[in-house]
Image (tube, rainbow, N blue to C red):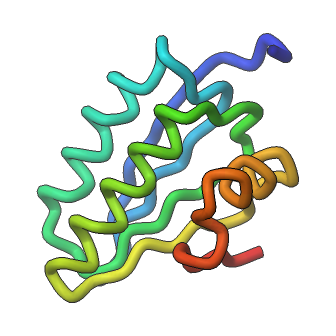
Amino acid sequence: MNGRPFNVAVTEQADVVIVRIAGEVDIVTVPVLQRHVDVALSAGRPTVVFDLAETTFLDARGVGVIVATRKQVTRKGGRLVIRHPPDLVRRVLALADQADRIEIED
């Protein structure tokens, strides 16, 4: 949409694993995102943070990754946090009836 290159970076800090996502999350980029999320989950940290400050687009497949990650993490007693979501991402999460089910930090 805006030409920003898609990028995912996974970092670990104490009991938290942070997945920073930049660019568009769509049918083309979701497989790459999912591979990074799998790496993040394998770290075994109780809290997973998706930092979406630089995310420019999120389609239904991206919402699916978020929902599946939330379910997987909470099943193990952990939590998923969405950090710095742009307004566009907030609207998509609301339309998908997920805004009240996911912890969001500004």
Question: Residue 88: x, y in percent?
Answer: 83, 45
Q: Quadrant of the C terminus?
A: bottom right
Question: Residue 44: x, y in percent?
Answer: 14, 70
Q: Quadrant of residue 69?
A: bottom left
Q: Quadrant of residue 26?
A: top right
Which residue lies at the image location 51% right of the left edge and 58% below the top edge?
A: 50
Which residue lies at the image location 73% right of the left edge and 63% below the top edge?
A: 84
Depth check, front residue: 96 or 106: 96
Q: Is residue 12 above or below residue 63?
A: below
Which residue lies at the image location 50% right of the left edge and 37% below the top edge?
A: 62
- Residue that extends furthest to the bottom in the rendered view of this protein: 77
Q: Is residue 60 above or below residue 89?
A: above
Question: Residue 74: x, y in percent?
Answer: 27, 79
Q: Quadrant of the N terminus?
A: top right
- Number of numbered tags placed on the structure image: 0
Question: Residue 38: x, y in percent?
Answer: 21, 45
Residue 96 placement, left or right of 20: right
Q: Is residue 1 above or below residue 11?
A: above
Which residue lies at the image location 29% right of the left edge and 67% below the top edge?
A: 71
Residue 23 placement, left or right of 8: right
